[in-house]
Amino acid sequence: MLFEPLSIASMTLPNRLVLPAMVTRLSGEDGVVNDDIRARYTRFSRGGVGLVVVEAMAVHSAKSGPLLRISDDAFKPGLTDLAQRCHDAGPGKVVPQIIHFLKVARSGWRQTVDMLSLEEIDGIVDAYGRAALRARECGFDGVELHMAHAYTLSSFLSRLNARKDSYGGASLENRLRLPLRVVAEVRARVGKDFPVGVRFVGEECIRNGYTVLDAAPIAVRLARAGVDYVSLSAGGKFEDARHIEGEPLYPYTGYSGDRCMPGSNYPDGANLAIPEAVRRAVRAAGLSTPIIAAGKIGSLALAAQVLEQGQGDLVGMARALLADPDLPKKWQSGREEAVVRCLYGNVCKALDENFKRVDCTLWPKKTGQAPESDDPTPPVWPAAGPSFGAELKEGRVLLRWLAATDNEGMYGYQVLRAEGDGLLLHHASVRAASLRYEDARIIGGTRYRYAVRPYDLAGNRGPASPTVTVDVPEA
Amino acid sequence: MLFEPLSIASMTLPNRLVLPAMVTRLSGEDGVVNDDIRARYTRFSRGGVGLVVVEAMAVHSAKSGPLLRISDDAFKPGLTDLAQRCHDAGPGKVVPQIIHFLKVARSGWRQTVDMLSLEEIDGIVDAYGRAALRARECGFDGVELHMAHAYTLSSFLSRLNARKDSYGGASLENRLRLPLRVVAEVRARVGKDFPVGVRFVGEECIRNGYTVLDAAPIAVRLARAGVDYVSLSAGGKFEDARHIEGEPLYPYTGYSGDRCMPGSNYPDGANLAIPEAVRRAVRAAGLSTPIIAAGKIGSLALAAQVLEQGQGDLVGMARALLADPDLPKKWQSGREEAVVRCLYGNVCKALDENFKRVDCTLWPKKTGQAPESDDPTPPVWPAAGPSFGAELKEGRVLLRWLAATDNEGMYGYQVLRAEGDGLLLHHASVRAASLRYEDARIIGGTRYRYAVRPYDLAGNRGPASPTVTVDVPEA
């Protein structure tokens, strides 16, 4: 089912895998598409993902850090070229995410929706309409309206929207008023058949924030208003952001940021209850609008489950595709084993928080992109074997092994773990330079078994090491 | 299944309903059981709940606000009397929750686990052991060790435990070291057959906090160490508490407090994924330890689902039982309709946050307890009917009606709502003094139907009003 096409208005996606919009900090402050942006997105397209959502680009010209722009016709040549190159690179469709944001200052001050005049609200509607039309004119396959996280339209949807007028927090219909005006204006500009999606958060994950109890009717209302797909995120708000002296407030730095990009301490598919509840409500209202689920979905089994159990119609994966843009091709050709698996260590998130270029820490150093290789030869262990050993130390299991070698270049090691008599399952990925791993999530009274497998730049797995067993005592 | 007995070590609960420990602020600063405490807990026992967990009582003598104590033999007469009275009042079993906490100051400073010396740690172990033995000597049926929320043992289990030694945050086994020492000491003191339960959080709900990925092995480890039941909560941490100038830091005031006691903006059973995942891991480890699920469980259908779907073996309900302590009796006798349903408006939580006596806002004013009545006569509408009407206003539906009357005393009104052609379902409860309700969770393009039913002090429902229909336009 993951590799069955899906039609959304006038576009037909070749499969159900989606790259959600992800900040890269690759663009300059001029907002113009540059070489780095072109390289990043064509790489995703080449990997075979069904839909690439290009990172948020501003519908207006307000000051910000590095950020793409679609706020003026001057940006159209670069964007047109980007859309064309992505189409040339792979079978997937490409839509830009378009964003409006409010002002933030280095003092910690930020503009909130209750400070906006009615004229400014009209201006937001107009800017979205014009930007969406530009997206169409640039040859994109659709457009995604950013109503998620800490940005303007999300702040209107928020339960903390403090406006007292008809755009205000006192009721769901009022909180929806501006988002619905934007949808209507965009639709009027781009025409009936051009796909218009929306991304919003299904749970704000902040004190007094909304949950799926509001997200479900919000999605129904947006779908009724003619939105062609609904993409669900979580958290990522200003309200719990950590202020760093002298830096503008940045979302994703608080707990709601953890929930937005669930790290290695979260279970896989940590946010799936959100799209599941929202989709159920949308279907109960008689609407067939596709729902995009996301949040630490990194395995074929979990992605397939999302579709089978009706937790979503499409599977969004940002970090997993950053780690390995070829994941779609590998999954489709039955080579899941060759996928370089995201660690969910959130180094990418930390880079963004520190205003640095967002690369994947797994990539070979200084390449700035995921390796591409068709080499079929897997790595090999030294003739005498990996000397794989385990030691129990201070409540952790410390694993060590000798380096494998590869004809082309080593990439890393996969650590497998079993509990008791269970199966050996993927447990962690380790960079090639590191020949050790510490497992701190063990408990007394359990037998653990470990193995390690080397992989090369193409993701080819070498043979598994011998298995080592560690009995953790109860004392 | 809810009303089948369950044996936990030496105690047999008459049913699967549990009152989790809930702060009351009824005790004095002397920590001695008083009339208000006796009245509160015997009321719960009379209502038929299977297990009453008496609010946290300190194992040590550190300064605090109003808080019960079990830190000295001097407290035993009061506690012995309380246990006896609860046993006399109903069929349920009674266990005290015993707590150790660290220091908090009005300046905002608080003591953290990394400030504790090894001698102080030994003292905590000893204090728990002595307190648990006192619980047994007082005639309680078991004892519950408080390892949840913002308190000492929870802070050791926390992923934010900052100790560098063998009690420290670097590994799960180290974080478990003190909690496991406490379990061992308590077991040595109380003997093999005395039920020892643990309550801890399945998800910390704070930045960098742990999730069920840690909670599952923690529960397995505690169960292996001989804990007789595991009760799961969420959040309630100091790390995101809101500091009020001049007041000591108080947990439950931040987002993690919202998640601890999910309010009306959360879906029913908001935390059930936690006990479900933990129970699965405990069973997979070959252990039969009963798991208590909790978090906005207020209906018979949902409570039954918890047991049927294996989300828990017991159902904890604090606010629902505060609103109506007779809920167990009413459910068991097929009178769910007569239950006074918690609004989850969290007035009780706000009272606690403001250092006030925790009563239910639904209770008749100044009574300080839930009404008790066997009166069988339901309320009646005025002869001309309730004049029930609905008006669409500023994105809300405003409902109004005329007062019903009752032979004994009106208690409130239940608002029922249906979407489209759906069934009329419980939507909200309204106090008797208020003859109106505003529904702010409506969206355009939907037909809503409403009805309202009066209920008296015994929970007897009068006839439903005529149904009114509201079509919310899309514009």
Image (cartoon, coloured by chain):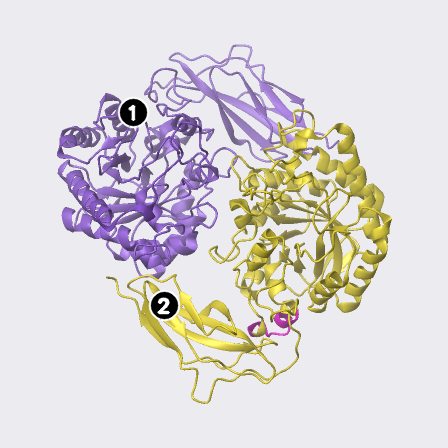
Chain colours: A purple, B yellow
Which residue of the protein is positioned furthest toward the front in this rendering? B246
Q: Which residues are magenta?
A: B329-337
Q: Is residue A106 left or right of residue A228?
A: right
Report the amino acid beneath label 2. Val
Nearest to viewer (mark 2 / mark 1):
2
Tag 2 residue: B397
**Whole-percent x and y of residue B270?**
51, 53
Say if B47 sits above or below B112 in the image. Answer: below
Any magenta on residue B149? no
Q: Picture coordinates of residue A459 (x, y %)? A: 40, 23
For label 2, the SS is strand
**Amino acid at dot 1:** Leu
Instruction: Count neighbours of disc 2 (C-alpha within 10 A) and say few if under 14, some if 14 to 19, many if 20 or more.
Output: many
Which quadrant, please, contains the C terminus of chain B?
A: bottom left
Residue A138 visible in the picture: yes
Number of numbered discs present? 2
Determine which quarter of the picture holds residue A351.
top left
Residue at the image position 76 percent from the left and 37 percent from the top: B124
The residue at the point 32 percent across, 26 percent down is: A25
The answer for which chain carries disc 1 is: A
Q: Are marks 2 and 1 in contact (CB under 8 Å)?
A: no
Residue A305 — which label? Answer: none
The residue positioned 14% from the left and 29% from the top of the image is A77
Task: Give the residue pinned by disc 1.
Answer: A26
Quadrant (top left/top right/bottom left/bottom right) for the N terminus of chain B: bottom right
> SS of the residue at dot 1?
loop
Number of residues whose C-alpha sits closer than 10 Å to that of mark 1, classed few (under 14), some (14–19) or many (20 or more):
many
Position of residue B265 in the picture relative to residue A87 (left or right): right
